[in-house]
Image (spheres, rainbow, N blue to C red):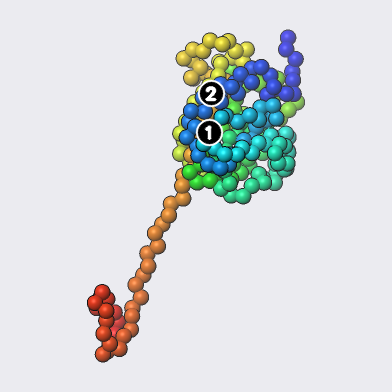
Amino acid sequence: MPQRDQSIYASAPVRRLLDDQTHAMTPDLQRCVGDYALLVGTSAEDASPPALPMLGCWIRMQVEGNRYQGDLLAASDEGLPFIDDAFELVLLQHALEATVMPASLLEEAVRVLAPGGVLAITGVHPMSAWAPWFRWRARGKRLTLSMPLRLMHALQQAGFEIEQARRVGCVLPAGVNAYTISTKLLGGGYVVIARKRRRVVTPLRIRPTPLKVPASGRLSPSTRRSAVL
């Protein structure tokens, strides 16, 4: 009988699920272009981001209770230590499950993502056969499973366009290698990819100002006779 383990993300079933999620989202993320990307994950061992040739530098952070570890250290209740619009891609790799403040982390991910950038979120689906096993295996550790539909709604309210939302992985955490069409509906994990809309530039309308000229003054040929005398 398998023993309960605090390092659930190092277990073989979850590592296979992480691989499946990376495989599912990499083709869409290949289009991301920019200088900086942010990966917020759950452990240093799984801090390897997908290979994206058109992105420059990855910043890697891991959620550990109420702290962020990795390339930068910070407290989770203080937000991510980055300026607004700092990244062209933000990947939350099961991070919403591990943090004690998932709503705040999602808000921070939206804040640091540049307009036109991509936010990718992965996790264990709470309505899958994985959920009871996941909670049992992680007993003693606070984990929150988020509904993808709720995440999508929150992102749409924040001005995002959903580009991909799908179930991935085996139906059962015991995991057979053979995949069937049912994994598209019953897979243990999910991937949500959304793009932040670019800011709309509103052209300024300059209101014409009446021009006073002397009665005997002459106007240039291009000036309309609507000036106030």
Q: Quadrant of residue 120?
A: top right
- Residue 125: x and y, percent? 57, 25
Is 62 on the left or on the right of 163, as rendered?
right
**Mark 2 to mark 1: distance in Å?**
15 Å
Q: Does the residue at mark 2 contact the one at mark 1 (Cβ under 8 Å)?
A: no
Task: Between residue 56 and residue 13, name the one nearer to us.
Answer: 56
Three-letter amino acid code at the position of disc 2: His
Residue at 60% in and 39% down = 57
Q: Position of residue 73 (x, y in %)?
A: 73, 41
Residue 159 higher or lower than 126, as above or below: below
Which image quarter is the C terminus in?
bottom left
Q: Amino acid at mark 1?
A: Pro
Give the label on residue 139, or none.
none
Question: The residue tagged with tag 2: helix, strand or loop?
Answer: helix
- Decide: few, some or many residues near mark 1? Use Cα within 10 Å; few <14, some 14-19, many ≥20: few
- The residue lying at 57 percent from left, 29 percent from top is 50
Residue 142's image quarter?
top right
Q: Quadrant of the N terminus?
A: top right
In percent of width and height, residue 14 lies at: 64, 20
Q: Residues within 10 Å of mark 2 (few under 14, many from 20)?
A: few
Taking the image as shown, residue 173 lies to the left or right of residue 161, namely right
